[in-house]
């Protein structure tokens, strides 16, 4: 199998691992309604934002892990702006699904797949 296709499949696999298995408490904490129910004090009003950021950072790290290792071993360029762009896009998309209820899971996952594909193209093509 072509190494570049294997990297893409690894990125998709790590997306599944991070977005479904590793979120743990962050899956609840990134929902504004969880904080309103479990920590209604004004002090915690915006704490869901840090949970969104932490999950989004973890996700962006995971999907870029394999291409980053590839470029370290075989040369290439790392794109910190692309990494932070993925963090921010993931935050906005998850907020639109979890809090604003503007998109569904299919739309959420489709956007994340587009992020992965775009990141893969930037790193390896």
Image (cartoon, rainbow, N blue to C red):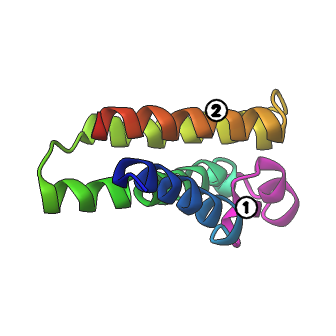
Looking at the rendered structure, the secondary structure element under dot 2 is helix
Residue 25 falls within the magenta-colored stretch? yes
Q: Do residues under tags 1 and 2 come within 8 Å of each other at their CB atoms?
A: no
- The earlier-in-sequence mark between 1 and 2 is 1
Q: How many numbered circles does the render carry?
A: 2
- Tell me where residue 103 appears, x and y as whole percent: 81, 30
- Tell me where residue 113 appears, x and y as whole percent: 60, 39
- Tell me where residue 60 appears, x and y as whole percent: 45, 51
- The answer to whether residue 119 of the structure is visible from this angle is yes
Please give left or right for residue 55 compared with residue 21 in the image. Answer: left
Looking at the rendered structure, the secondary structure element under dot 1 is helix
- The answer to whether residue 95 of the structure is visible from this angle is no
Name the residue rendered at 60%, 50% in the picture: 52
Q: Which secondary structure type mostly characterizes the magenta part of the structure?
A: helix
The quarter holding residue 34 reads bottom right
Of residue 47 and residue 103, the one placed in the foreground of this image is 103
**Mark number, residue 27:** 1
Name the residue rendered at 46%, 43% in the picture: 87
Of residue 69 and residue 103, the one placed in the foreground of this image is 69
The quarter holding residue 99 reads top right
- Tell me where residue 114 appears, x and y as whole percent: 57, 32
Q: Which residues are magenta?
A: 24-42
Please name the residue that numbered disc 2 is placed on: 111
Please give left or right for residue 61 compared with residue 81 in the image. Answer: right
Of residue 17 and residue 54, the one placed in the foreground of this image is 17
Taking the view exactly as shown, the residue that stands out farthest to the left is 75
**C-alpha distance separating marks 1 and 2:** 18 Å
Q: Please tell me whether mark 1 or mark 2 is closer to you in this view.
A: 2
**Mark number, residue 83:** none
Q: The N terminus lies in which quarter of the figure?
A: bottom left
């Amino acid at each position: 199998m072509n190494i570049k296709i294997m990297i893409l499949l690894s990125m998709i696999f790590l997306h599944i691992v991070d977005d479904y298995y590793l979120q743990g408490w962050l899956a609840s904490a990134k929902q504004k309604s969880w904080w309103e129910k479990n920590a209604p004090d004004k002090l915690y009003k915006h704490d869901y934002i840090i949970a969104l950021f932490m999950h989004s950072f973890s996700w962006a790290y995971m999907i870029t892990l394999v291409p980053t290792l590839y470029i370290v071993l075989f040369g290439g360029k790392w794109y910190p702006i692309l990494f932070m762009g993925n963090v921010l896009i993931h935050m906005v998309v998850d907020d639109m699904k979890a809090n604003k209820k503007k998109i569904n899971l299919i739309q959420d996952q489709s956007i994340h797949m587009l992020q992965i594909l775009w990141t893969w193209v930037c790193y390896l093509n």
